[in-house]
Image: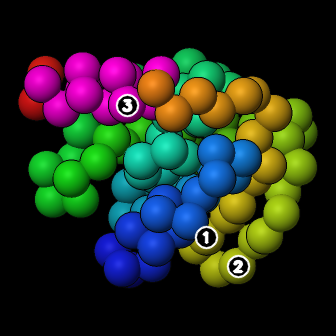
Amino acid sequence: MSDKIVLNEVNNAGDRIHLYFNGWVGLYVAYGISAFLLSKETKVSPSYSQDMQMPVAVVNAGHYDMLKQKLEVLKKVENYRCLKASVPYDEEEYSEWAGALRNKS
């Protein structure tokens, strides 16, 4: 699964939010650029994943239901969702945000 996450984020042009549902805890998890865009779309408490070496953010299933009312769902497969972001992506802003999270961890 981690290879798929890394590939999705490397190819993320800043217009997609990739979410992965973890049924064990009932949360949708976003990494990298997706986590950044998610934090701009809604209130989250982002962190930095040492294992994945990128930012991470989570929302619960109820919060996801609210997001899908606001954003276009581009793909829905098993435990994976892809949403079209409605906020602009700025690479410099992302880099500063990710660096601050990494330094906190």
In the rendered structure, does residue 55 fall within the stretch colored magenta? no
Comparing labels 3 and 1, the label whose residue is closer to the camera: 3
Rounded to the nearest angstrom, the CA distance separating label 2 from label 1 is 5 Å
Q: Are marks 2 and 1 in contact (CB under 8 Å)?
A: yes
- Pick the front one: 103 or 65: 103
Cα distance in 3D space between marks 3 and 1: 25 Å
Label 2 is placed on what type of residue? Val
Residue at which label 1 appears: 80
Discs 3, 2 touching: Cβ within 8 Å: no
Q: CA distance from mark 3 to mark 2?
A: 30 Å
For badge 3, the amino acid type reads Ser
Q: Secondary structure at mark 3?
A: helix
Q: Which residue is mark 2?
A: 77
Q: Nearer the viewer, residue 49 or 22?
A: 49
Q: Which mark is residue 95?
A: 3
Looking at the rendering, in which quadrant would you find the N terminus? Answer: bottom left
- Give the number of the disc on residue 51: none
Q: Main secondary structure of the magenta part?
A: helix
Q: Which residues are magenta?
A: 93-103
Q: Residues within 10 Å of mark 3 (few under 14, many from 20)?
A: few
